[in-house]
């Protein structure tokens, strides 16, 4: 097994793998302290959800969501941090049922889909795993695992990012020496698409189609340029 990617805790900056971070988050002293300082009479339920690329688990996120947030809220968060490039369709798969932003209520393309406007507390339970797909053409597939549910003080933000993987460094496919800064969306499928700044200019497919290396499982796919909201 290769070396697993690591990330830093939002609260204490300690570094762990995804599995280690899930365990750490529940016991993090700095997080517990912040929750205590912001305690109020108003309470809410919260789901802790870990998210990974279905086919590349080096990319991961750990988020906490208010239980009255909707699947649509989670979809928008995923688009903002990891996915949005051309306004593609997306869907969650929960127990064999599809939840979409604009569901086809007539079922012209299969069983009728449900709306993403449903609250998380109506569809999620601790321990369950669900699928997610962005872009039904050049798709990016994710897996979401509900690792915890707790009751705590009400927070203004429906979704909070607790941790994510550190940016993954790719070595240039051409020279094999320097860190890649761009990726060719055509060559990436042959495993040779990563390019350093020096090798970009001589790439056979040209420079106009190159995309930036991003900390996302959608890196190198379609026209994805990275998030304008969240830094890598």
Image: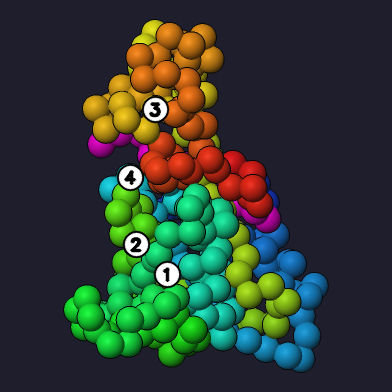
Q: Which of pointers 2 and 4 indicates the residue nearer the eye?
A: 2
Mark positioned earlier in the residue sequence (1 or 3): 1
Residue at image mark 1:
147
Mark positioned earlier in the residue sequence (3 or 2): 2
Secondary structure at numbered mark 3: loop
Q: Which mark is residue 133?
A: 2
Q: Which of pointers 1 and 2 indicates the residue nearer the eye?
A: 2
Badge 3 local density, few (<14 within 10 Å), some, or many (20+)? many
Report the front residue among 51 and 140. 140
Give the Cα separation between the discs numbered 1 and 4.
20 Å
Residue at image mark 3:
184
- Examine the structure image and report whether residue 5 is included in the region drawn in magenta: yes
Secondary structure at numbered mark 4: loop
Give residue 170's quadrant in the image: top left
Give residue 217's quadrant in the image: top left
What percent of the width, then of the height, locates residue 30?
70, 59
Give the quarter of the figure containing the N terminus.
top left
What percent of the width, then of the height, locates residue 147?
42, 69
Report the front residue among 167 and 141. 141
Which stretch appears magenta? Answer: 1-11
What percent of the width, then of the height, locates residue 89?
40, 64
Callout 3–callout 2 Cβ contact below 8 Å: no
**141 lies above or below 184:** below
């Amino acid at each position: 097994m290769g070396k697993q990617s690591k990330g830093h805790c939002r609260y204490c900056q300690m570094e762990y793998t995804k599995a280690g971070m899930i365990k750490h988050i529940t016991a993090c002293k700095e997080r517990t302290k912040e929750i205590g300082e912001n305690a109020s009479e108003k309470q809410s339920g919260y789901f802790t959800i870990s998210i990974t690329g279905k086919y590349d688990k080096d990319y991961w996120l750990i988020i906490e969501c208010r239980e009255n947030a909707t699947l649509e809220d989670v979809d928008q968060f995923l688009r903002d941090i990891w996915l949005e490039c051309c306004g593609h369709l997306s869907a969650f798969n929960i127990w064999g049922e599809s939840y979409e932003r604009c569901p086809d209520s007539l079922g012209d393309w299969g069983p009728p889909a449900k709306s993403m406007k449903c609250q998380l507390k109506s569809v999620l339970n601790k321990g369950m795993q669900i699928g997610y797909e962005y872009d039904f053409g050049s798709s990016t597939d994710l897996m979401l695992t509900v690792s915890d549910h707790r009751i705590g003080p009400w927070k203004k933000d429906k979704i909070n990012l607790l941790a994510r993987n550190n940016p993954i460094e790719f070595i240039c496919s051409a020279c094999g020496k320097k860190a890649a800064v761009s990726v060719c969306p055509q060559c990436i499928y042959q495993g040779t698409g990563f390019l350093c700044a020096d090798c970009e200019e001589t790439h056979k497919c040209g420079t106009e189609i190159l995309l930036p290396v991003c900390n996302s499982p959608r890196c190198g796919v379609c026209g994805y340029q990275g998030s304008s909201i969240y830094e890598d």
